[in-house]
């Protein structure tokens, strides 16, 4: 039982899973039939980015990726037996995490803005025969 973390209170947590993954997100721990369940919202994984500038210099960065990139779900449930340890996020990490989520929301808004309803008349000017007659008349007038 995960008894070293507060139950039924939302917090920003880092979860080390038994398969080696490290998952970050807003979470709530709760009891269910003697087992602790973790409800995690907007889970992300960290990704270390390394770029070699030249032979003597290297740049490292840390980025986030969605935990399940192909899912539209916001909430996931982790079972106690799949978690090795739980820790709270540092203040700096919370700031980076929240910024990442805001960027994701802005990207979703931009995608929605670019979507257009396709209608049968979109871009419709006329029939080919009519356009041909118009172009021939313009050509003859020149």
Image (tube, helix red, strand yellow):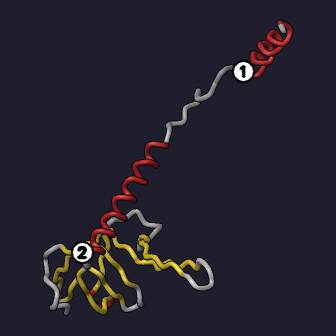
Q: Point out residue 25 in the picture as x, y percentages from the top left corner.
A: 30, 73
Residue at 29% in and 81% down: 14
User: Which of disc 2 and disc 1 is earlier in sequence?
Assistant: 2
Residue at 44% in and 42% down: 113
Q: Quadrant of residue 125?
A: top right
Q: How many marks?
A: 2
Q: Which mark is residue 127?
A: 1
Quadrant for the N terminus, please. bottom left
Q: Point out residue 96 in the picture as x, y percentages from the top left corner.
A: 33, 69
Residue 141 vs 78, above or below: the answer is above
Residue at 80% in and 11% down: 138
Whole-number angstrom distance, CA of label 1 to CA of label 2: 63 Å
Q: Farthest residue toward the right?
A: 140
Q: Residues within 10 Å of mark 2 (few under 14, many from 20)?
A: few
In contact (CB < 8 Å): disc 1 and disc 2: no
Taking depth in this image into account, of 93 and 9 the one nearest to the observer is 93
Q: Residues within 10 Å of mark 1 (few under 14, many from 20)?
A: few
Q: Nearer the viewer, mark 1 or mark 2?
A: 2
Q: Quadrant of residue 19?
A: bottom left
Residue 133 vs 101, above or below: the answer is above
Q: Point out residue 123 in the picture as x, y percentages from the top left corner.
A: 62, 28
Label 2 residue SS: helix
Q: Which mark is residue 69?
A: none
Residue at 50% in and 36% down: 117
Q: Which residue is mark 2?
A: 91
Residue 114 vs 94, above or below: the answer is above
Label 1 residue SS: loop
Quadrant for the C terminus, please. top right
Q: Point out residue 27 in the picture as x, y percentages from the top left corner.
A: 24, 75
Taking depth in this image into account, of 62 and 74 the one nearest to the observer is 62
Q: Farthest residue toward the top?
A: 141
């Amino acid at each position: 039982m995960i008894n070293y973390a507060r139950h039924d209170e939302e917090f920003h947590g880092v979860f080390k899973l038994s398969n080696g993954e490290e998952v970050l997100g807003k979470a709530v721990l709760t009891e269910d039939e003697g087992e602790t369940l973790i409800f995690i919202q907007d889970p992300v994984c960290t990704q270390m980015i390394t770029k070699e500038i030249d032979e003597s210099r290297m740049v490292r960065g840390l980025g986030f990726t969605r935990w399940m990139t192909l899912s539209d779900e916001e909430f996931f449930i982790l079972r106690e037996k799949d978690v090795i340890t739980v820790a709270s996020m540092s203040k700096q990490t919370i700031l980076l995490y929240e910024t990442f989520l805001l960027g994701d929301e802005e990207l979703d808004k931009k995608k929605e803005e670019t979507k257009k309803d396709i209608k049968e008349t979109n871009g419709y000017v006329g029939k080919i025969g009519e356009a041909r007659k118009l172009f021939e008349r313009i050509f003859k007038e020149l």
